[in-house]
Amino acid sequence: MGSDREVEKSHQKEKERKKMLAIAPIAKPLAGKKLSKKTLKLVRKASEHKCLKRGVKEVVKSIRRGHKGLCVIAGNISPIDVITHLPIMCEEAEIPYVYVSSKEDLATAGATKRPTCCVLVLTKPAKGELAPEEQEKIKADYGQIVSDISELTSSLF
């Protein structure tokens, strides 16, 4: 008999395996564990400072209005037709985008209980102003993640 810790570990691995099986085939560039963790941390910071647009409708509206940022899309959306137009819009507007493995993780990072298809991390808040040091922190994290994403994308294509 295994200990509780071993059983819990095997359940965790099983959940992780199911997450990877649920990812859509168009989910490229898909962030690895490290990049995914960094990206979700940036989403969490952005949600705390009101620099985040959640959901397909809000993200599309922001992109059409010319807002710039980082688009984070969940890879396990079903039906996939809901988000197939987002990468094209992002490429036309020259907005970097990346897929993460789970819509639940994306919602948790975005401070919502409801699973979220996509979020747009803005470099500055939609309303009001941020303290200069906070804005610099977000911009630094944003810059590093964008460079990691461009590196990932260049290795893909």
Image: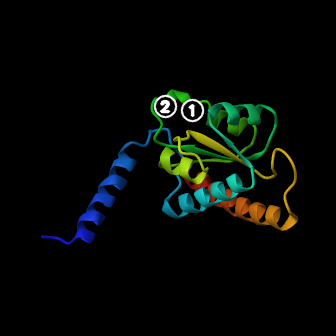
In front: 145, or 154?
Answer: 145
Q: Nearer the viewer, residue 153 or 109?
A: 109
Residue 88 coordinates in the image, percent (x, y) = 65, 34
Q: Amino acid at mark 1?
A: Ile
Task: Please name the residue shown 75% across and 61% down the image.
Answer: 138
| Residue at the limit of the structure toward the left, as seen here | 1
Q: On the image, numbered disc 2 is attached to which residue?
A: 80
Q: Is residue 17 above or below residue 94?
A: below
Query: Do the residues under discs 2 and 1 have CB atoms within 8 angstroms?
Result: yes
For image coordinates 61% across by 57% down, the residue present is 39
Give how far across and how far down residue 21 sits, in percent. Answer: 36, 45
Vertical side of 27 occupied by 11: above or below: below
| Quadrant that contains the N terminus | bottom left
Query: What SS does tag 2 mark?
Result: helix
Residue at horizontal 81%, vertical 52%?
A: 124
Q: At which x and y percent is residue 76?
A: 45, 41
**Is 113 displayed left or right of 42 in the figure?**
left
The amino acid beneath tag 2 is Ile
Q: Residues within 10 Å of mark 2 (few under 14, many from 20)?
A: some
Relative vertical location of residue 9 with respect to residue 115 in this rendering, above or below: below
Residue 83 disc label: 1
Q: Would residue 154 be visible to someone looking at this image?
A: yes
Q: What secondary structure is marked by label 1? A: loop
| Position of 55 relative to 41 (above/below) | above
Q: Furthest-front residue in view?
A: 113
Q: CA distance from mark 2 to mark 1?
A: 6 Å
